[in-house]
Amino acid sequence: MGDRAARARHGRRSAGSTAVIRVGSMQEGDVPSIVGLEDPSLVHEDELRAELLRPWARLWVAREDDDAAAVAFLSTWHVADEIHVLNLVTRPERRRRGIARALLREAIAYAQRASAVRILLEVRRSNAPAIGLYRSLGFFAFGVRARYYRDHEDALEMMLVFGPTGEIERRPDEVCAAP
Ligand SMILES: CC(C)(COP(=O)(O)OP(=O)(O)OC[C@H]1O[C@@H](n2cnc3c(N)ncnc32)[C@H](O)[C@@H]1OP(=O)(O)O)[C@@H](O)C(=O)NCCC(=O)NCCS
């Protein structure tokens, strides 16, 4: 799907403003703004360019109003009937405006169109903002990967499951999510 067709417009909370969030497929020209979203050591330019070339990668960015620079991005892999979330980052000063949620909604809509059966991800057990976001969209915790990260923090494995007609199946946690 081309960028124009993949775009969605989402209203966002903002004091008295009707600014919109535009979500579209990531293009090569978005790489510099994505590298600058957060600590450059966390998002590498070479890795981003490599992702763009992988046929199974699905990458989205979000922009605000007419600002051309991406303020958030979401990278996923679509393998067989599963979508795996690899990275999701919103520029620190643009957080809590529904931008990451808009990106994930785009990925969920893509998964439904592609008849995927689930979306999977790992998240640091201490990452309450991200866990709260995933839960709000229907993800539940189903596993723990002990000492998964370089600093030995555990990863919580979360999943969003689609039913036979593509609806999101809300399920309770299968493991304790607390750190
Ligand atoms: C996690 C992250 C992507 C969320 O981005 P965001 O654009 O601020 O998220 P949204 O505004 O769409 O938040 C949607 C929901 O997530 C939850 N949430 C987000 N930030 C939160 C916070 N700081 N504290 C508690 N809940 C939070 C809330 O449920 C929120 O809904 P609400 O604002 O209506 O209460 C962002 O904090 C980030 O980039 N963190 C660093 C990278 C990271 O941890 N990525 C996840 C890797 S698995």
Image (cartoon, rainbow, N blue to C red):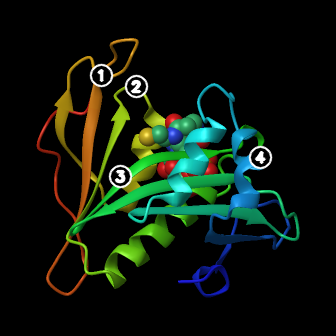
160 with respect to 32 (left or right): left
At 17% across and 59% down in the image, what residue appears?
A: 171
Amino acid type at mark 1: Pro
Looking at the picture, how far across and down is residue 175, in whole percent? Answer: 13, 36
Q: Residue at x 69, y 34 (%)?
A: 38
Mark 3 or 4, which is nearer the eye?
Answer: 4
Q: Position of residue 28 (x, y in %)?
A: 69, 59
Residue 160 in the image, given as x and y percentages of width and height = 26, 60
Q: What residue is disc 1 on?
A: 179
Structural distance between the alpha carbons of marks 1 and 3: 16 Å
In whole angstroms, how far apart are the C-alphas of marks 1 and 2?
6 Å
- Is residue 141 visible in the rendered image? The answer is yes
Q: CA distance from mark 2 to mark 4?
A: 29 Å
Please name the amino acid that badge 3 sits on. Arg
Query: Of the numbered discs in the image, which one, if any, rests on residue 126?
Result: 2
Number of the front mark, 4 or 1: 4
Query: The disc labelled 2 sits on which kind of residue?
Result: Ser
Q: Secondary structure at mark 2?
A: loop
Do labels 1 and 2 touch, CB within 8 Å? yes
Q: Which residue is mark 3?
A: 135
User: Which corner quadrant holds the C terminus?
Assistant: top left
* First in residue order: circle 1 vs circle 2: 2
Which residue bears the numbered disc 4?
Answer: 32
Question: Mark 3: few, some, or many residues within 10 Å (few <14, many ≥20)?
Answer: some
Comes first in the chain, label 1 or label 3: 3
Label 3 residue near ligand 1, CB within 8 Å: yes
Q: Is residue 44 above or below residue 121?
A: above
Mark 2 Cβ inside 8 Å of ligand 1: no
Looking at the image, which is closer to me, 16 or 139?
Answer: 139
Ranked by sequence position, the earlier of labels 3 and 4 is: 4
- Whole-angstrom CA distance, mark 2 to mark 3, is 14 Å
